Image: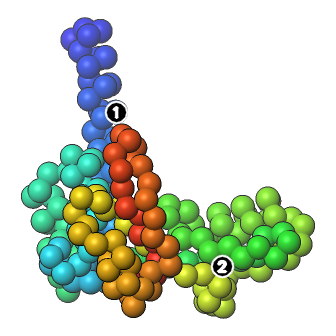
Amino acid sequence: MGRIFEVRKHAMFARWNRMAKQFTRVAKDIAISVHAGGPDPASNPTLRRVLQNARAVNMPKDKTDAAIRRASGKDAANYSEILYEGYAPHGVALLVGNGNRQPHAHRRILAQYFHEGRREYGHDRQRQLLFKKMGVFRVDPSHVKDHDELELDLIDYGLEEMGDSTGDKGEPQLVIRGDLP
């Protein structure tokens, strides 16, 4: 055919390979979130976030809908998120999500880089009590009528900190941190 064809073919196959890896990862995340909260994105915030990630990698809507149907079916693969716990040197507790790594990779990394001190490892949920899930919300201050009233309302829901900040583009933001439901 020719050299130009071979160069184009190589570029197309490399792009398709990247897309296949990204689409597989997003489909797995869709399955996990559908099992956790149901197939409706309106009532499942995790699924909404995963669908935004799918749009970010240009995954077609028919593929996301098919992944949701597959995940909500009877013969769906049962993926689950596993949190591994351990201690680093000086008693620092670690909580590691499985991500793309296998359990033996986590053990190897703990053994390789944290060879001093104790290296306890597992997922018996003892160290999870040391951590809190926190959320950070950035709100446009022009949408808030009374900051003090908002702060008092959010304290009932677990607000820990509220303050003013600037965003990436220099616009003012209201930052809300806490264990909010």
Q: Is residue 145 left or right of residue 160?
A: left
**In x, y percent, where is residue 60?**
14, 51
Q: Which residue is mark 2?
A: 85
Q: Which residue is mark 1?
A: 14
When asked about the image quadrant of residue 3, the answer is top left
Q: Nearer the viewer, residue 12 or 100?
A: 100
Q: Secondary structure at mark 2?
A: strand
Q: Is residue 44 above or below residue 52?
A: below
Which residue shows up at 18% across the image and 81% down it?
Answer: 43
Which residue shows up at 77% across the image and 80% down it?
Answer: 120
Q: Is residue 129 above or below residue 136?
A: below
Which residue shows up at 57% across the image and 67% down it?
Answer: 102
Q: Can the viewer see residue 31?
A: no
Mark 2 packing: few (<14 Cα in 10 Å), some, or many (20+)?
many
Mark 1 packing: few (<14 Cα in 10 Å), some, or many (20+)?
few
**In x, y percent, where is residue 143?**
22, 63
Q: Secondary structure at mark 1?
A: helix
**N-terminal of the two: label 1 or label 2?**
1
Q: Is residue 164 above or below residue 123?
A: above
Q: Is residue 88 above or below residue 73?
A: above
Q: Quadrant of the N terminus?
A: top left
Q: Nearer the viewer, residue 154 or 56?
A: 154
The Cα–Cα distance between marks 1 and 2, rounded to whole angstroms, is: 37 Å
